[in-house]
Image (cartoon, grey):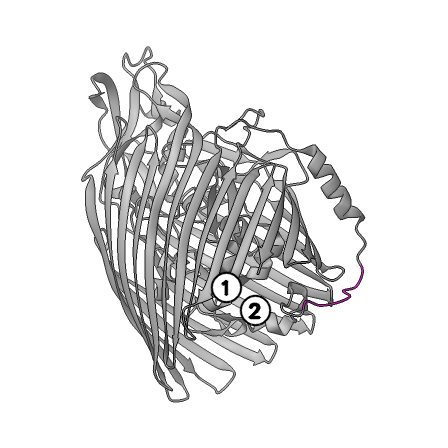
Amino acid sequence: MAKGFGLRQDVARLIALCGGKVSLRAPSETRRPVRKVLLIPTVTALISLPIPRVMAAEAQERGLTDLSIQELMNIEVTSVSKKAQKLSEAPAAIFVITNEDIRRSGARNVPEALRLAPGVDVAAIGGGRYAVSIRGFTGRFSNKLLVLIDGRSIYTPIFSGVVWEAQGPVLEDIERIEIIRGPGAAIWGANAVNGVINIITKHATDTQGILASTGTGTEDRDFATLRYGNHVSANTSYRIYGKTEARGESDDAAGNPGNDGSHSSRAGFRVDNEQDDGHLSVQGEAFNFAAGDRIFFPHFTSPYDSTLRDSQQRNSGGDLLGRWDKTLSATQDVSLQTYFDFSTFAIENFSAFQVKVVDFEFEHRIRAGDRNDVTWGLSYRSMGYRADGTETNSFDPTSRDLRVAGGFAQDEIRLTPEALRLTFGVKAEHDTYSGTQFMPDMSLLWNVDATNQIWTAVSRAVRTPSVAERDATYSTNGVTPPSSSSPLPVAFVAVPTGFGTERLIAFEIGYRSEIADNLSLDLTSFVHHYRGLSAYEVTGTPGPASSGGVPYIKVPFTIYNGLSGEEIGIEAAGNWRVNDWWRLQVSYSRMRIKFGDEVGDGSIGASPRGILSLRSSMDLVAGTHFDLWLRHVGDRRTQTALGSTDVPQYTTLDSTLSWKLPYQLELSLVGKDLLDSRHPEFISNIGVSSEPLTVERSAYIKLTWTY
C-alpha cells in the first residue's frame, strides 16, 4: 500500500490546500482568437512613438511623474501601526500602490495591480482566479496572507485564504493599496503571517459627479462601470456604483479551449459624514460571480479519474460596514468599526459553502507626553458556516460557529527626539480551533539623517486551522483503478484530526534612502523560522468502505503539524525620476526555503525563487501617457515526497497608452503579455484541481468619461 500511495502525485495538489509540504509516511462561452488586427498596430504604434518633453501639466491632477522622490517617501500609511505615519518612518517593509499607479499599469483587477509591489507573487490560474502570496507559500488560497478592504477582512475560514475572483472593487475608487511584507500579527492578529494587504478606498467627497467607463478586448471581452457621487448636505457625501465584466476562455497548453469563461457583476455605495470632532462612514456591496472550469474529479467507478468540462463555479454575497472615528482631545482618539459579511462559494459536483461573518473592533490611541504614543484595542468576530459535500468529501459537523476574541496594545517610544523610535506591541487572540495565542512584535527605527533610515524588527505570528483542515473528510483528486494487487479501487482519504496552529518567528532588517533628489532605494532582508507547518501522514490500516453503494479500499491519512523550515530572502525597490517627464521603477525579490535536509528550488506552494519588475512611465505631449512594464518570473517547483510540479520561467511585457481627450474623456489602449502567444503561470493546488491553463497575449481598449 505504501508503494501504491507514493504513485499518487495528485495527493500533493489536494493537501497543499494550506500551503504545507507533504510528508507521507507508513503507519507509526465560444472562444475567439487573438485579434492580430488590433495587437499589431498597437505594438507598432507604441514602438514608433516620439518621446518629447512634457509641454503642459494637467491643472486639476498631478501625474505619477510629477511627484518628487521626497513626496513619494512621505505618503501617509496606516497599516503598520493603525495610525497615520509617513512611509519613510514606518518600521516595516511596506510598499504603497497609488491610484495613479493602478491607472497607468493597465491592471483590470486588484491581483494584477498587486504585481506592482516587490515581494508579491501573483499568478493567473484561469477564469478570473489568481494565486497571490507574499514571501512564498503561493497557492489558490495562500493561507499566510491577510487581506483587508477598508478594514474588513476578506480572509475566508473555509480554506484559509482569499477567494480573489469574488473581490472586485472599482479600481478608480481605490485611493491606495498598502502592502506589508512580513508579519503584521501584533496589530492585525492571526493569519497575518507573511504579509498584510490593506485596500483603502476613497472618501465619498473625492468621488463626486459621474464616472462612466467601458471597454472591450481579446480576453477582457466586455466591461463597464458607472459611478455617481453627490452631497446630501455640506457635511455628508455619498457615491453609488455598479460594474460588470466578462472574460473569455483561456487555452490549455495544447491550445484547446479551457471552458473557464467568467462573468461578474456588483453594485454598492458609500456614505461619509464629516463632523467637527470625528467622521462616520457607512458602505456596502453585493456581488455575483460565475465561471466555467475543467476539473479533475475522482469516481469510484470507471473511468475513475474523469475530466468534467461542464463544471461551474459560482460565488455571491454582500457586506455592510460602518466606521466611526472621534477625536476626544488633542492627545486622544477612538474608533469603532463593525461589519457584516455574507458569501457563498460553490463548485459543481464538489462542494458548496455559506459563510456569515459579524465583526466588532474598538481602538483607542493616547499620546502620552513627548515620548509615548500608545494604541490599544479589542475585537470580536463570529464566523458561521454551512457546508454541503458530495460522495467524495463531507464535513462533520456540516455547520459550526467559529469565534475569535482578542485585544492588542502597542507603544511607540521616542528614545531620542528625532533619531530613535522603539515600538513594542502584542496581540492576544482566542479562537475556537486553536485556543489562546500571543503574537508579540518589537521594532526599532533609526533616522540616520533626513534622507536615510534603518529599521529592524522581530515578530511572532500564527496561522490558525481552516474548516477544511479540521472538519473535512475528503478523498484525493485521484482514485486508483482495480489491479492485480487490489480487486477494488483505492482512494486516499483525509480524515479530521486535531490540526493546530502554524507558527513563525521572523527577523527583518531594512534600509531606505533618498540617494538624491531624483533617486530612492528600499532594501529589506529577512529570515523566517517556521514551526508546526502542515504535513500529511498515513495513520490507519487500509480497509473496505463504500460510497453510494460502490465498494472501495480506503487508505486514511491525516494532517498534522509535523514540519519546520527556514526561509531567507531579500527584497529591493528603486525609484528613479530621470527627468520631469520620465520615471523608472525597478523591484527584485529572491528567497529560498529549507526544510530539514531537503532544499527545494522554490518555496512550497509553488512560489518562484526570483521576481524582477521594471516599469517605465512617460508623460508625452500634454495629456498623453505611455507606460511599459517588463516582468520576469522564475521557475516554480513544488517538491514533495510524491514528486514535483513545474511551471517554467516566463517574461512578460505590458504597455499602456492613454490620451486625455476633450469633454472629460480619456482613451486607453493596453497590450498585455506581448512577448509570447501564451504561457502557463500556475497549477491549481486545491482538492479539486483545475486543469492547467495558459495566459495569452491580449489587448483591450477603454473609454472613460468623468463629469
Q: On the image, numbered disc 2 is attached to which residue?
A: 511
> Is 47 on the left or on the right of 12, as rendered?
right
Q: Identify the mark at residue 528; answer none if there is no mark.
A: none
The verdict on residue 219 being magenta is no
In depth, the one of 554 and 279 nearer the eye is 279
Residue shown at the point (48%, 44%) measured from the top left: 244
Q: State the count of labels.
A: 2
Question: What element does badge 2 sit on?
Answer: strand
Quadrant into which the N terminus falls: top left
* Extent of the magenta region: 52-58
Q: Which is more toward the observer, 444 or 376?
A: 376
- The answer to whether residue 8 is visible is no
Residue 141 vs residue 676: left or right?
left
- Magenta region, main secondary structure: loop
Q: Nearer the viewer, residue 396 or 92?
A: 396
Instruction: Write the residue at 33% across / 36% down.
Output: 346
Identify the residue under disc 1: 207
Q: CA distance from mark 2 to mark 1?
A: 36 Å
